[in-house]
Image (cartoon, rainbow, N blue to C red):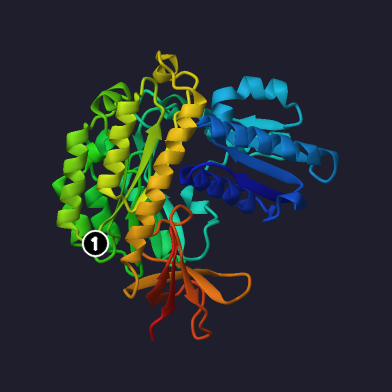
């Protein structure tokens, strides 16, 4: 039978999907890209915020309709199942099998039982993982769960406490990926800067990055979701002195007003965040800084929101995303008084993003006439341009570089590109031979 997959949510979820694909492939199933061609469809869901839950339910219901035609089995996994398995089982009987995160160790047993096949108690493993991100880049997950317990976040309750992977396993997977031709590794966890504390009694991200650097044929390394309070001098020094680690820090700060940060149970205050930003830009002049913000947190006043707006204008982040606060089941903040009305949250989000659009546009203007190394990843439908990325661009999240097509080059090559036009989020350039 043909098996299709839909992976919703974050890159950490995608890694799990890729390992599940590997299990099916190992057992002889045909993997198809088009979900409509599948006899078996597996949907890996996200349950992080309200919009993700809505997307998951909508997707499940959409493909449940195909049970009337070609689709024989519909399987649903992931965070949404972990949070709401009983409710989903009752409300969507068209789904043949729900598998929660806590049952991933029995995943293949459950699937085998559903398909009336013998089970060999096979476990999810990075060794069988099938990449879905192309031939050049792959995500490298170094930990599961989270122990920060921010008051707005459901992840610790869904995925459990922060659990680092064994150091040796990470390096083994990295070497395997590079042997397959991968040139860029994106290191991910809910909080990469906490890597190793639970296993080894100390953070080991900087050490891990240095060991990844030693892998021959690996071109770019980046790490995402690095919480500001855990970024120390050693980590900054490792990034600064590296020719492989992208000069890029993703700092999910969420807010700048001290009272809001305290209510969020964040470990940084406004002063330390501003101090870190200044230090990073001093130590690494070409550093790219990315952040995420939450607006409309319970009790957020107009004055606190204005403080956030002023901070955004002053800090001029290269990349910035804003989310309207979502009251998540089981989180402390969902019970806080002074919940901000949806209309105000939406206005505040749009205000922040409008500010950032102008900031991004101005920052990218400074890139004009400069030369950057780009990775060619795709080509436009009309064939006139390659689509590429620089060290400044996280795949699927940041902007891209449209590069004049040149028949002497191809997808998955690194090329030097002179920028000749800039937009709000993207660049346009031509290859310098």
Res. 195 visible in picture: no
Q: Which residue is rendered at x = 45% and y = 52% of the image?
A: 397
Point 35% across, 27% down: residue? 302
Residue 152 in the image: above or below residue 410 = above
**Secondary structure category for the residue under label 1:** loop
User: What is the quadrant of residue 32 in the picture?
Assistant: bottom right
Location of residue 77 by image quarter:
top right
Q: Is residue 227 above or below residue 234?
A: above
Residue situated in front as seen by the camera: 376 or 281: 281
Q: Residue at x 76, y 36 (%)?
A: 64
Seen at 41% across and 51% down, the residue is 357
Residue 62 x %, y %:
73, 39
The answer to whether residue 45 shows anywhere in this view is yes
**Mark 1 surroundings within 10 Å by alpha-carbon count, few (fewer than 14), some (14 through 19), many (20 or more):** some
Q: Judge left or right: residue 339 versus residue 261.
A: right
In this picture, residue 83 sits left or right of residue 353: right
x, y percent for residue 13: 50, 42
Viewer-proximal residue among 79 and 250: 250
Total number of numbered discs in the rendering = 1
Give the labeled residue for mark 1: 286
Camera-side residue: 120 or 175? Answer: 175
Residue 228 x %, y %: 25, 40
Q: Is residue 396 above or below residue 41?
A: below
Relative vertical location of residue 136 with respect to residue 324 in this rendering, above or below: below
């Amino acid at each position: 039978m043909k098996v299709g997959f839909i992976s919703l949510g974050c890159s950490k979820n995608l890694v799990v999907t890729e390992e599940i694909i590997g299990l099916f492939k190992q057992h002889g199933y045909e993997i198809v890209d088009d979900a409509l061609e599948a006899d078996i469809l597996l949907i890996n869901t996200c349950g992080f915020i309200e919009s993700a839950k809505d997307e998951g339910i909508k997707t499940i219901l959409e493909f449940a309709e195909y049970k009337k035609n070609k689709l024989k089995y519909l399987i649903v996994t992931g965070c949404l199942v972990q949070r709401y398995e009983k409710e989903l089982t009752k409300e969507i009987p068209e789904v043949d099998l729900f598998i929660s995160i806590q049952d991933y160790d029995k995943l293949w047993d459950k699937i085998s039982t559903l398909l009336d096949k013998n089970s060999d108690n096979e476990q999810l493993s990075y060794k069988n993982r099938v990449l879905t991100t192309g031939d050049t880049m792959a995500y490298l997950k170094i930990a599961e769960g989270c122990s920060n317990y921010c008051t707005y976040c459901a992840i610790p309750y869904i995925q459990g406490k922060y659990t680092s992977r064994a150091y040796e396993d990470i390096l083994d997977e990295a070497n395997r990926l590079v042997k397959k031709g991968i040139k860029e590794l994106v290191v991910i966890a809910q909080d990469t800067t906490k890597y190793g504390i639970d296993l080894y009694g100390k953070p080991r991200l900087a050490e891990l990055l240095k060991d990844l650097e030693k892998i021959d044929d690996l071109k770019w390394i980046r790490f995402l979701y690095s919480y500001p309070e855990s970024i120390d001098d050693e980590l900054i020094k490792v990034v600064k002195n590296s020719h492989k680690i992208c000069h890029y820090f993703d700092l999910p700060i969420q807010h700048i007003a001290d009272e809001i940060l305290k209510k969020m149970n964040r470990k940084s205050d406004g002063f330390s965040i501003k101090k870190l930003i200044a230090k990073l830009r001093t130590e690494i002049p070409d550093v790219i800084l990315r952040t995420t913000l939450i607006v409309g947190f319970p009790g957020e006043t107009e004055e606190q929101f204005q403080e956030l707006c002023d901070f955004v204008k002053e800090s001029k982040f290269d990349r910035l995303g804003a989310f309207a606060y979502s009251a998540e089941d089981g989180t402390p903040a969902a019970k806080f008084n002074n919940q901000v009305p949806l209309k105000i949250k939406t206005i505040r989000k749009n205000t922040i993003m409008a500010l950032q659009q102008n900031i991004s546009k101005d920052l990218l203007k400074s890139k004009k006439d400069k030369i950057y190394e780009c990775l060619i990843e795709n080509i436009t439908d009309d064939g006139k341009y390659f689509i590429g990325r620089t060290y400044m661009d996280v795949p699927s999240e940041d902007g891209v570089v449209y590069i004049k097509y040149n028949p002497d080059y191809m997808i998955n090559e690194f090329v030097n590109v002179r920028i000749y036009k800039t937009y709000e989020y993207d660049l346009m350039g031509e290859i310098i031979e």
